[in-house]
Image (cartoon, helix red, strand yellow):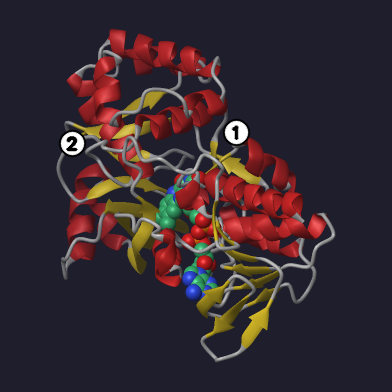
Amino acid sequence: MLIVGGGLAGLACAIRLHDAGAKPTIFEASDAVGGRVRTDLVDGFLLDRGFQVYLDAYPEAGNLLDKTSLDLRPFKPGALVYQGGRMLRVMDVFRTPRHLVTSALAPIGSFADKLRVALLKWRLSGVSIQDIATHEDMSTELYLQRAGFSTRMIDVFFRSFYGGIFLERELRTSSRMFEFTFKMFSQGSATLPACGMGEIPRQLNMRLPCGTVRLGAQVTDIHSHGVTLKSGETIAGDAVVVATDASSAALLLPKMNLPEPAWRSVTCLYFAAARSPLNEAIIALNGTGSGLVNNVCVPSDLASDYAPPGQSLISVSVLGIPNLTDMQSLVLKELESWFGSEVQEWRHLRTEQIKRALPEQAPGLRNSGAGFRKHAGILVCGDHLWSASIEGAIISGQRTANAILHSS
Ligand SMILES: Cc1cc2nc3c(=O)[nH]c(=O)nc-3n(C[C@H](O)[C@H](O)[C@H](O)COP(=O)(O)OP(=O)(O)OC[C@H]3O[C@@H](n4cnc5c(N)ncnc54)[C@H](O)[C@@H]3O)c2cc1C
């Protein structure tokens, strides 16, 4: 069984096939598994390829992963919001009751908004993820308006918090995706593995026998009983799974008419500092409605391995890929108003520009419902066929493996 792509979908598919006694082979074009979830060691710092978090309430990913050995480090539930020249604390008061007063008094949204958050949390706790897929779909912005949230709450909090998740501040993303992530945030924590997000695919890869993954093996042609590599080598197999990102799948399988998605992009700037500007495991958001920065966090405040001893790693996310030659200095100048002049002492480590970070998830976008697509004996899976998330990629990969096992 041949799997094209060693991201989370391809790995999850291969594990299920292997556990059922099959012998899958993964062909991965790059130099390591993980796809969009990778971590690089640079100068003693662990740099995730773009800021992302593992939500520990993900049900299927949670069943597949050994969460204990990932040593997940949670962010505090809530956020700091930079607004009006101040850092305001907005916490999930049901999980951190000691912040009840500061959060209730924070001038972000009215008291009624805070009650609406509680109501939404309660309402979504009573529905399953499968139910969410049947709910009326609309833009997240319209959904929040219909739920009665004030314009201020939407503009100052939701645009920056969900901007960092959906990688767009207009909140055009499907309300079903909003309900899914809101439910996951309510039921668990946003976390980072102690040794970086790349530990997730690394752990999955360890569950496969040696030789299952062929790295540097770009597939250029696919037919129902085999693949051809860029090197010219042709390999035959009794099933072919395409577990690449949506655009690569569309290119490899022109006859399948797979939709080429619009992509959400993000730029992540990493800095080293002598001390953490936050000094706690929390995400800081830009609630000003202007500027380049969307969110900031300090991964080394959660897990010390992210930075060498005595140093802090700062992660700054800018939505999109702005065409600016002096972005680094513009970002630092902006953050000087957040954190003071110490920002000028920060050392730039790396800027990651991720053009294809998330496929757009517009309202009404129909996936197959099965989590995969099949055409002329070839199966296609990946986050674009379930939800653009770690959970979505894993579910899609597993369902594809189930389909192969049930048909053989
Ligand atoms: C910056 C960023 C932030 C994110 N934030 C979060 C978050 O906070 N929480 C969350 O749950 N999710 C988040 N995500 C989404 C999540 O990472 C993805 O949905 C998921 O990793 C997609 O996995 P996949 O296996 O479907 O695809 P991919 O990870 O894209 O894997 C596809 C693989 O196929 C390989 N490939 C492509 N073409 C070929 C070919 N021709 N031959 C061989 N190999 C090929 C690629 O090299 C790649 O390894 C984020 C993603 C990014 C980039």
Q: Is residue 115 left or right of residue 77?
A: left
Residue identified by numbered label 2: 288
- The residue nearer to you, when weighing 55 against 286, is 55
User: Is disc 2 placed on a helix, strand or loop?
Assistant: loop
Q: Is residue 350 left or right of residue 217?
A: left
Residue identified by numbered label 1: 57
Q: Residue furthest front?
A: 376
Place of residue 51 in the rendered image (x, y in percent of width and height, measured from the top left) = 42, 53
Q: Quadrant of residue 143?
A: top left
Image quarter (top left, top right, bottom left or bottom right) of the C terminus? bottom right
Q: Is residue 194 left or right of residue 295?
A: right
Place of residue 68 in the rendered image (x, y in percent of width and height, measured from the top left) = 73, 44
Residue 294 visible here: yes
The residue at the point 67 percent across, 66 percent down is: 239
Q: Quadrant of residue 11?
A: bottom right
Kind of residue at badge 2: Thr
User: Is disc 1 placed on a helix, strand or loop?
Assistant: loop
Q: Residues within 10 Å of mark 1 (few under 14, many from 20)?
A: some
Numbered label tally: 2
The residue at the point 50 percent across, 64 percent down is: 244
The residue at the point 37 percent across, 9 percent down is: 115
Place of residue 277 in the rendered image (x, y in percent of width and height, measured from the top left) = 37, 47
Q: Residues within 10 Å of mark 2 (few under 14, many from 20)?
A: some
Residue 149 visible here: no
Q: Residue 82, relative to residue 248: is it above or below?
A: above
Q: CA distance from mark 2 to mark 1?
A: 30 Å
Q: Residue 215, relative to residue 195: is it above or below?
A: below
Q: Is residue 139 left or right of residue 30?
A: left
